[in-house]
Image: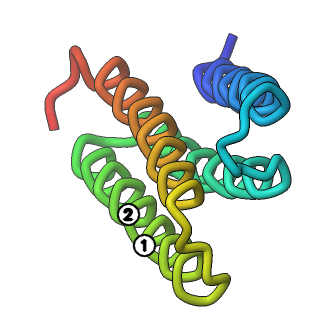
Amino acid sequence: MKPLLKYVQLLLSLEFLVLASGYFIVSKSEMGIQFGNLALLSAVFTVIALVTIIIFIRGQGKEAASQTMHSLVSVTLKFLLELVLAFVWFFVAKKTELSSVVLFFVLYLAFTLFSVILMTKTLKNKYL
């Protein structure tokens, strides 16, 4: 199986796991989290992670200098897109209550760890 397809399937599995566990938590607790917010935010984080993975894996088939550039571009783009998402989420949409802030950073942590683990596993035996 191609690495890109494998990683996309893992990302979609993570998205499904987040949505399923989020639905369970929202329906069984009184934390004030709305499932619509969870679904929207996790979908945006999934798209950002997907773009990052596509750019990163695309660069792995090229020469060493291009691999480095693709890795840097993917990490930088991920950072910038998540920065814009944080700005829109907190300042434009005014999601500043504690449950929304915790939701944002828990999802940020989950999808960032996924990206970091994917990149370190891919780069484990390569030199940049």
Mark 2 Cα shell of 10 Å, populated few (<14), some (14-19), many (≥20): some
Judge left or right: residue 108 versus residue 128.
Answer: right
The residue to which callout 2 is attached is 79
Q: Residue furthest top?
A: 1
Q: Residue furthest front?
A: 30
Element assignment for label 1: helix
Q: Nearer the viewer, mark 1 or mark 2?
A: 1
Residue 74: which quarter of the image? Answer: bottom left
Whole-percent x and y of residue 31? 65, 43
Whole-percent x and y of residue 113? 39, 32
Judge left or right: residue 76 versus residue 53.
Answer: left
Residue type at numbered disc 1: Leu
Dot 1 and dot 2 residues touching (CB under 8 Å): yes
> How far, Cα to Cα, is label 1 from label 2?
6 Å
Element assignment for label 2: helix
Identify the residue at image location x=61%, y=25%: 7
Judge left or right: residue 109 versus residue 67.
Answer: right
Whole-percent x and y of residue 23? 82, 31
